[in-house]
Amino acid sequence: MKNRFMTVQDMTQELGISRTTAYQLIKKIKHTKIGRRLLVTEEDLLDYLHNHTEVRNSLNQNNNI
């Protein structure tokens, strides 16, 4: 299975986020810079979102007790 590279524009479309948010997010993820383009693998993006969503959900559940 090939790993898909995503640009900032791809991230904005897939996640429904602004360009500014995408750039802030990409700084926190392992990424590659080719020329002026920043690329992140779909796998790395999903791993990051999965790990940070679980932490946020855990914190929200603890605050609701």
Image (spheres, helix red, strand yellow):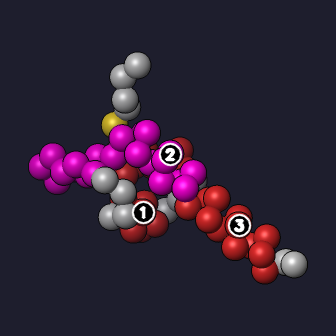
Q: Is residue 13 visible in the rendered structure shown here?
A: no
Residue lying farthest to the top in this orientation: 1
**Hey, what amino acid is under mark 1?**
Leu
Question: Of residues 60 and 4, which is closer to you in this image?
Answer: 60
Q: Earlier in the sequence, mark 2 or mark 3?
A: 2
Instruction: Give the position of the N terminus as an image quadrant.
Output: top left
Q: Earlier in the sequence, mark 3 or mark 1?
A: 1
Q: Which mark is in front, 1 or 2?
A: 2
- Can you identify the residue that label 1 sits on? 25
- For the residues bearing labels 3 and 1, Cβ distance under 8 angstroms: no
Q: Which mark is in front, 2 or 3?
A: 3
Residue 42 lies in magenta, yes or no?
A: yes
Q: Earlier in the sequence, mark 1 or mark 2?
A: 1
Q: What residue appears at the point 37 percent right and 29 percent down from the top-left corner?
A: 3
**Hey, what amino acid is under mark 2?**
Leu
- Can you identify the residue that label 2 sits on? 46
Q: Would you identify the image quadrant in which residue 54 lies?
A: bottom right
Stretch in magenta: 31-51
Per the image, label 3 sits on a secondary structure element best described as: helix
Report x, y in % for residue 17.
53, 59
Report x, y in % for residue 46.
50, 45
Spatial distance from mark 3 to mark 1, Cα to Cα? Answer: 20 Å
- Can you identify the residue that label 3 sits on? 58
Residue lying farthest to the right in this orientation: 65
Label 1 environment density (alpha carbons within 10 Å; few <14, some 14–19, many ≥20): some
Residue 5 relative to residue 34: left or right = right
Report x, y in % for residue 2.
36, 22
Q: What residue appears at the point 28 percent right and 51 percent down from the top-left corner?
A: 31
Image height check: is 8 above or below 27? above
Label 2 environment density (alpha carbons within 10 Å; few <14, some 14–19, many ≥20): few
Q: What residue appears at the point 49 percent right and 47 percent down from the top-left corner?
A: 47
Per the image, label 2 sits on a secondary structure element best described as: helix
